[in-house]
Amino acid sequence: MSNISNKLKNCKGVYLDYAATTPLTPQVEDYIVSLLDTYQNPSSMYQSGVEAKKIITTARNNVAKFINTKPEDIIFTSGGSANNTLFIKGYTQKNECKVLYSPTSHKSVLKCVESLKYKCPLKVNYTGKIDIQDLKECLSMDTMKKLVVIEYANSEIGTIQDVKQIIEICHFYNAIVYVDCTGSISQIPVDVKMLNADGLGFSAHKLGALKGTGVLYKKPSIELEPLIYGSQEQGLFGGTENVIGIAALGTAVEDYNYFSITSENRDYVHDYIINNIVDSHIIGADIDSRLPHNLYVCFDGIEGESLMILLDMADIQVSTGSACTSGDLTPSSTLTAIGLDEKLIHSGIRMTFSGYETKDELDYLCSNLQRCVGILRQLNK
């Protein structure tokens, strides 16, 4: 099956904000409907409670297989931000250590790290890639224990990190590594045995499942202080389990199809912009080194927010960056970290594709991009 393509025909307009969230797959939607009467507490000992617990167990097994680990290594949370906070706070409360982190990280990471006593931002280049030499220097600068927090790929500008190399370097210096995979999980498969990360997390709603469910993987040797106290999820994330959300994720990952993912549609739009809209700038890594569905582009002489509104009037949905920073007109921390000029920062939009857009939809997008950029540039003369 295709991951979310069957749902596209029911969507209004041209939706190009898949990095923010994805529609439910038909299989997930049908499964959710079948479970709406499953309201029993999975911790209960009577039969219907036991059945609810079985649903969670099946989902946990599916998720473990999805990332190539054991079911007991999977902790269900309420989402990506909860994953990041649980691992960072949980680890630093158990261990006095310094946190080394990418300044292009998700806001939940940046805000969490702000509250810590010992932390150090890593240098990144103009594409958002971590400076390997700086990483080595930061790891060797003192004898303090270290936790390194990175993102597999940046959901705003699409840059993919050299994750395997970074983890190997960190382990050479006896550092612990946590990888935020929420921005990449829909397009890049994760094999925790191959990566050898000490912890990683991702969110269900990036995979055609429901919002409100996250997955945290950690090695059995890693001890964390709970984020929410209780008896569920190894005592690390207490509270009655979100049975339907967990079940939806378990179904979404069961036959998720990474082989269908290509950059063809993204590249079609990329080439049109480069060849037909002057003074445009593709932000982030080269198209071969970024998420295959990601395109972040800035246009001289306009404001990205205005372009987003004009496109929305044409029934085309894009974003001006991460949805978690929408409504905040301060410069994006990612774009600031890579050294982008503030004026250029506010001239950009992010388009993230499903990969199943039709040629008519792509042509409609391209023609409206050119038209709307032209309108805004004429108004700003």
Image: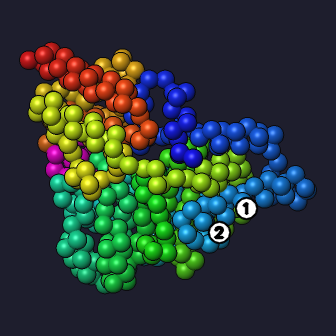
The residue lying furthest to the left in this view is 381
The part of the chain drawn in magenta is 331-340
- Residue hosting label 2: 71
Q: Is residue 12 left or right of residue 110?
A: right
Q: Which disc number belongs to residue 57? A: 1
Residue 175 visible from this viewpoint: yes
Task: Give the residue displayed 42% in from the left and 50% down from the top.
Answer: 261
The crowd level at tag 1 (other Cα within 10 Å; few <14, some 14-19, many 20+) is: some
Task: Give the residue displayed 19% in from the left and 73% down from the top.
Answer: 133
Which x, y percent locates residue 76? 62, 58
Which quadrant of the figure contains the C terminus?
top left
Q: Which disc number belongs to residue 73? A: none
Q: Mark 2 near mark 1, Cβ–Cβ under 8 Å? A: yes
Which element is circle 2 on?
A: helix
User: Which amino acid is tagged 1?
Assistant: Thr
Tell me if residue 366 comes above or below residue 197 in the rendering: above
Tell me if residue 339 comes above or below residue 97 in the rendering: above
Q: Nearer the viewer, residue 345 or 351?
A: 351
The crowd level at tag 2 (other Cα within 10 Å; few <14, some 14-19, many 20+) is: some
- Give the colouring mode of the picture: rainbow
Tell me if residue 44 comes above or below residue 5 in the rendering: below
Which x, y percent locates residue 269? 27, 36
Q: Quarter of the image holding residue 271?
A: top left
Q: Nearer the viewer, residue 203 or 316?
A: 316
User: Which amino acid is tagged 2?
Assistant: Pro
Residue 107 visible from this viewpoint: no
Task: Give the residue displayed 46% in from the left and 55% down from the top.
Answer: 259
Which element is circle 1 on?
A: helix
Which x, y percent locates residue 379? 15, 15
